[in-house]
Image (spheres, grey):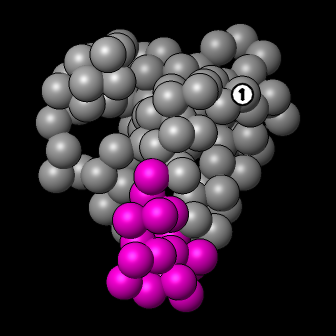
């Protein structure tokens, strides 16, 4: 089992997703957020479970996809850092550029 660390960016992403979905359905928002946490728990148990992020093409950057949301994480020796959570329709690089501001 590895330790999971959440970046500030990933915490903001989670909050933004929850608020966006809650505007139309509180129960759906809760469902999606729960599924994201379940997926992260799976990473804790099996850090190699995610696929390699195609845009980055490096083994250490991995992702799990949950209901259209990409959980991007950095696989390290004894831990994983959740870097960001983006919708699959979003451009990953544009998302990172926007979050740097």
Give the residue at mark 1: 5
**Residue 15 image offset from top left, x and y in percent:** 54, 52
| Quadrant assignment for the N terminus | top right
**Nearer the observer, 55 or 85:** 85
- Which residue: 38% across, 65% down? 20
Q: Is the magenta stretch mostly helix, strand or loop?
A: helix
- Residue 23 magenta: yes
- Residue 98 magenta: no
- Which residue: 74% across, 21% down? 79
Is residue 55 visible from the viewing direction of this image?
no
User: Quick check: 46 left or right of 66?
Assistant: right
Helix, strand or loop at mark 1: strand
User: Quick check: 24 left or right of 9?
Assistant: left
Q: Give the range drawn in magenta.
A: 16-32
Residue 82, located in which quarter of the rendered image? top right
- Which residue: 78% across, 17% down? 78
Residue 11, located in which quarter of the rendered image? top right
In the rendered view, would you say 92 is above or below 88?
A: above
In the rendered view, would you say 94 is above or below 42?
A: above
- Which residue: 64% across, 48% down? 40
**Nearer the observer, 52 or 8:** 8
């Amino acid at each position: 089992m590895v330790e999971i660390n959440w970046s500030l960016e990933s915490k903001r992403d989670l909050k933004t997703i929850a608020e966006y979905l809650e505007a139309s359905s509180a129960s759906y928002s809760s469902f999606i957020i729960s599924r994201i946490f379940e997926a992260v728990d799976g990473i804790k148990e099996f850090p190699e479970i995610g696929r390699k992020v195609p845009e980055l093409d490096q083994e250490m950057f991995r992702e799990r996809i949950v209901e259209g949301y990409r959980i991007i994480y950095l696989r390290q020796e004894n831990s994983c850092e959740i870097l960001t959570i983006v919708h699959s329709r979003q451009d990953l690089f544009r998302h990172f550029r926007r979050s740097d501001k």
